[in-house]
Amino acid sequence: MFHSARTTMPALDYVSIIRSVYTDRRAMLAGVFASAVAAGMGAAKTGSLPLYLIALAFIAIGIIRYFDMRAFWKADIEPDDAAGAEHWENRAVLSGSLLALVYGLWCLVSMAFVVDPFASLSSASISIAVMVGICARNFGLDRLVTFQMLAVIVPLSIGYASHGDIYHVVLAALLFVMLASYRKLAGDIRSLLLSAVHGRVEASRLATELDIALTTLEHGLCMLDETGRVSVANERATRALEELGVSNLIGRRLGSVLEALRSENKVPRTAIDRLEEIIGRHLSGKVLLSVDGGTYYEVTVSSRQSRSVLLFEDISERVAAEERISFMARHDALTGLANRTYFGELAAEDLDARRNGPPGTAALMIIDVDDFKHVNDTYGHLAGDELLMQVARRLQAALPPGSILARLGGDEFIVYRSSVGDIGAAGAEAQALLAAFHEPFRLDGLTLNVNASVGLVTSDDPEAQFDELMTKADLALYTAKSGGKGRAQIFHAQLDTDYHYRQRLKADLKQAVQARSLSLAFQPLLDITTRRVVSCEALARWEHPELGEISPAVFIPLAEEMGIICDITEWVLETAARECAGWSGGVGVAVNISARDFRTLDLAGAVDEVLACSGLKPERLEIEVTETAVIEEQHMARNVLEALSERGIGIALDDFGTGYSSLSYLNALPFTKLKIDRSFLTDIDENPRALRLLASVARVGRDLDLTVVAEGVETEAQLAHLLNHTDVQQVQGYLFSRPLPASDAAELIRRMNRAAVRPNLQVAGVVNGL
């Protein structure tokens, strides 16, 4: 989105798109003047000086854009002048973004500072109308659309959020959904129009190319007769071989031509020998000729009977493009530094070399820009990107020669030093990196004081592993940020203790999974009307022989990090299905699935095997996924969940409201159940607004034909509100039961479902009677 559209479309299309942006300057000027009048009216009504300035800014920028558009048409760029068009695209992005920013500031000032109904209404309505115009006018330039949308939406969202109530905050958040929608709309318009244009151009191109193919040949061509002499050579082949030092092709034996190439020493001898072998044996194949100076020819040899044809293709640009692609694959696009993958390769390669080299101390440092999110949120992503680029340059200047610097991702950078002398020298280098942040950063008129935190680990162990150093440096960085930020932390003994404790947990967890010594607990889900248990959620538990019960919040992330979460998932599926098969009354069981399961586990196959072995009917099994898991693996999740749904297995969206909470996923994926997160129930007893929000979420789920579940029900008052004021159908929580072992869960199901037929019997009494 931050790159020129020149890189995404042919030159003819690109120039045509740029011309469309600069059309109808009078309409543009009229719209800007109308906005200036509206802002001036608001200023006159409120007496606000900022609104007067905004009105003047509209007029000034409108006039500038008007003359800029006139200058474009006077420039009269050629239809295929992509470089010239890119210049005008950059000017359009600059002026258009600046104008959009004025609209955004108009909204912000009107809502957050002036707080006048007319000023707020006029600024918001006109700015939103302008966003529609942005899509219609600038649809071809994704970068311009995105920058203008952000320039309007970010200040507008801040203005709405400044009101402080949940409705304006939600409205502010929805503006970013509008941003995504408008970008998608612009992209669809662009694709539709360009597709139509391309269809017409393609038909014309095919007709032209057919004519060219009959009369000319794009590549150099040489034909050899039965005696191995060059009988035919077109101009391109002649010119290519002259560049290699060979002239007078016609009538020369190929052996003489190849010998002349050897004597010039411009082409590797191995390539010439290979070419001679293919032709001499009347074979077919390809040979790459790399010429001094960066020129590359691909020679395609086709032989039939005693004749051969050589086709010379200049692939210099393709090779250069492949080299650029290779560079882009290994480097960060924003800063130009090595990316995480390439850095890992370089560091691991050096660590491997140290095993057979002289002793020394290596160091790994992770640098995190403190409060970078605040910069992005306050000044925008453009300022954030500029800050990251300046940080990269300062780090490069502060590091000694031979250092490997990379952008780890987001606002994190990483440094590897093959030799630092000792831990004291490494600490001094870390302090030098911190000192690089002492000077304020200047970003397009902004002056920002930014600090960083550094996590440092050193090692003189020749057997040190890169992943181990990364883990320790990350622990040190976490400690540095926890200790107040703006400081460097060297990995020390206590951190090592914490690290080894974590490693011990990993080892013991792996052993526990292999020994199948985890256990399952089951928490019931009840029908809110009948109070019958309709299903139980299966929850993994780990009782460590020495450390006692380990929280799932600890060992589940460890399992995902270790890559053994799929083993746990398979075991939970198998055990839960076996237990559920013995429950009475058709009570089902729900099993949680992680994002990694979508990537590495044949989930559909595993479910089929579990159902076959346990005899459990598919409709009694339910798969629970979180919004985060679906977002991380969208394509795989869709395929797997659709396959499970076709088998009759229920699909539940767990913890709804804690992740992205996108209604599009509810519609796009085959969910059968919506589990509302416990946070929605926190204060529904005292807060009518919270109750209305919960009721609205439940109503959405019911409208989508989903079974709606409320999680975390803990009091009779909450249950009464759910029953009387919402469309919730099922409930789950400690009011009914904590997670229980399998035997207690079966007994609970029998007692609660038997008690449910007696309407006056209290559920709590059934639970307490266990």
Image (spheres, rainbow, N blue to C red):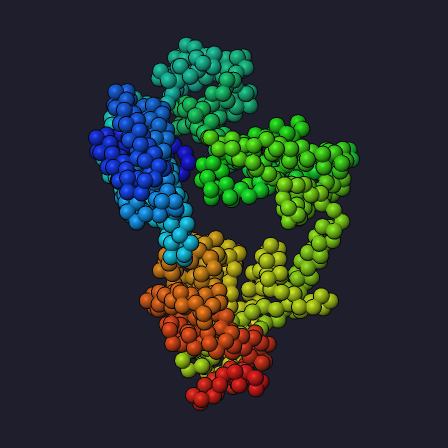
Instruction: Answer above or below: position of 109 versus 628.
Output: above
> Where residue 107 appears, x then y in whole percent?
34, 43
Instruction: Answer above or below: position of 415 versus 124.
Output: above
> Where residue 568 appears, x then y in whole percent?
58, 64
User: In which quadrant will I find the C terminus?
Assistant: bottom right
Residue at image coords 43%, 18%: 228
> Where residue 351 appears, x then y in whole percent?
69, 38
Kindly indicate the quadrant of the structure image that contains residue 730: bottom left
Residue at image coords 51%, 78%: 736
Instruction: Answer above or below: position of 410 versus 638.
Output: above
> Where residue 312 appears, x then y in whole percent?
41, 23
Residue at image coords 64%, 33%: 435
Q: In the rendered image, is residue 364 in sight? A: yes
Kindly indicate the quadrant of the structure image that contains residue 417: top right
User: In which quadrant will I find the N terminus?
Assistant: top left
Q: In the rendered image, is residue 515 in sight? A: no
Which one is in front, 680 or 717?
717
Residue at image coords 66%, 41%: 487
Which one is in front, 565 or 434?
434
Which one is in front, 576 or 180?
180
Which one is in front, 516 or 535?
535
